[in-house]
């Protein structure tokens, strides 16, 4: 999706090079604090006075399992039940992991993943290889589910919706081009596939 925005921006400003830095929310926030990035697109983090934030899309994370996983046969799967499974999770500090840990912690549940990864792709491959179950953004997992490579697991007491936000340091001043990029993100139809 962001590729479409970068393409449109490139058509409007062919002499400007957009640099993309992909990492977890914690690292990105540190780069914003050091003025190494103009602004960032991340999963929501707690509101802090030092930043200007603006939500631009809401989606959800889901639990995915191998096609023949035993939990698919259970009538009611709960968050507590997930703690007994081989969990494949993003690294601490990533938005997906922070949300999952916070939701589980609010239920006094502790998770001990057997695999932590900096990429969702590695977790997808691990689920397909039947190593365990993963928590992933639905938009990333859905094509694999649609192809029958994995299944979404309904967990009755787990809500992993999240808001994606743009943020920048309150003291930063965006250029005219930076402001235009911000507006492109804000007004883009994120529901279009």
Image (cartoon, helix red, strand yellow):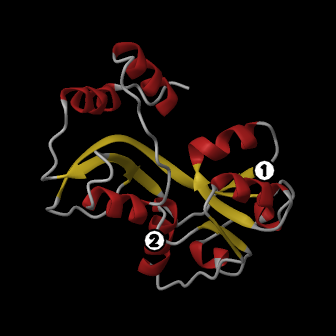
Q: Residue furthest front?
A: 15
Residue 160 in picture, x, y percent from top left: 48, 59
Q: Earlier in the sequence, mark 1 or mark 2?
A: 2
Question: How far separated are the C-alphas under marks 1 and 2?
Answer: 23 Å
Q: Residue at x 14, y 53 (%)?
A: 170
Please give left or right for residue 75 compared with residue 175 in the image. Answer: right
Where does residue 163 sit, x and y in percent of width and height? 37, 49
Q: Is residue 193 left or right of residue 130?
A: left
Q: Nearer the viewer, residue 9 or 67?
A: 9
Q: Which residue sits at x=49%, y=74%?
A: 101
Q: Residue furthest toward the top?
A: 11
Q: For residue 154, what is the image quadrant?
A: bottom right
For image coordinates 24% across by 49% down, the residue present is: 168
| Residue 150 visible | yes
Instruction: Say which residue label 2 marks.
Output: 103
Q: Are marks 1 and 2 in contact (CB under 8 Å)?
A: no
Which corner quadrant holds the C terminus? top right
Q: Residues within 10 Å of mark 1 (few under 14, many from 20)?
A: many
Is label 1 in a helix, a strand or a loop? loop
Q: Which residue was labeled with disc 1?
A: 150
Quarter of the figure with residue 112: bottom right
Measuring from the top left, give residue 65's x and y in whole percent. Answer: 75, 59
Q: Secondary structure at mark 2?
A: helix
Residue 171 against residue 115 in the figure, above or below: above
Q: Give the image quarter of residue 119.
A: bottom right
The answer, for residue 1, to whether it is visible in the render is no
């Amino acid at each position: 999706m962001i590729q479409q925005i970068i393409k449109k921006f490139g058509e409007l400003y062919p002499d400007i090079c957009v640099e993309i830095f992909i990492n977890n929310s914690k690292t990105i926030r540190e780069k914003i604090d050091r003025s190494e990035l103009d602004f960032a697109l991340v999963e929501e983090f707690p509101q802090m006075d030092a930043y200007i934030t603006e939500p631009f899309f809401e989606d959800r994370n889901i639990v995915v399992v191998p096609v023949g996983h035993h939990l698919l046969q259970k009538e009611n799967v709960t968050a507590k039940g997930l703690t007994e499974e081989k969990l494949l999770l993003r690294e601490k500090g990533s938005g997906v992991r922070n949300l999952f840990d916070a939701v589980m912690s609010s239920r006094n549940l502790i998770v001990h993943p057997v695999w932590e990864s900096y990429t969702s792709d590695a977790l997808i491959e691990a689920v397909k290889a039947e190593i365990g179950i993963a928590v992933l953004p639905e938009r990333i997992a859905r094509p694999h589910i649609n192809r029958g490579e994995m299944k979404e697991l309904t967990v009755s007491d787990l809500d992993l919706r999240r808001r994606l936000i743009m943020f920048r340091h309150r003291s930063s001043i965006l250029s005219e081009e930076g402001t235009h990029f911000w507006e492109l993100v804000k007004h883009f139809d994120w529901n279009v596939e």
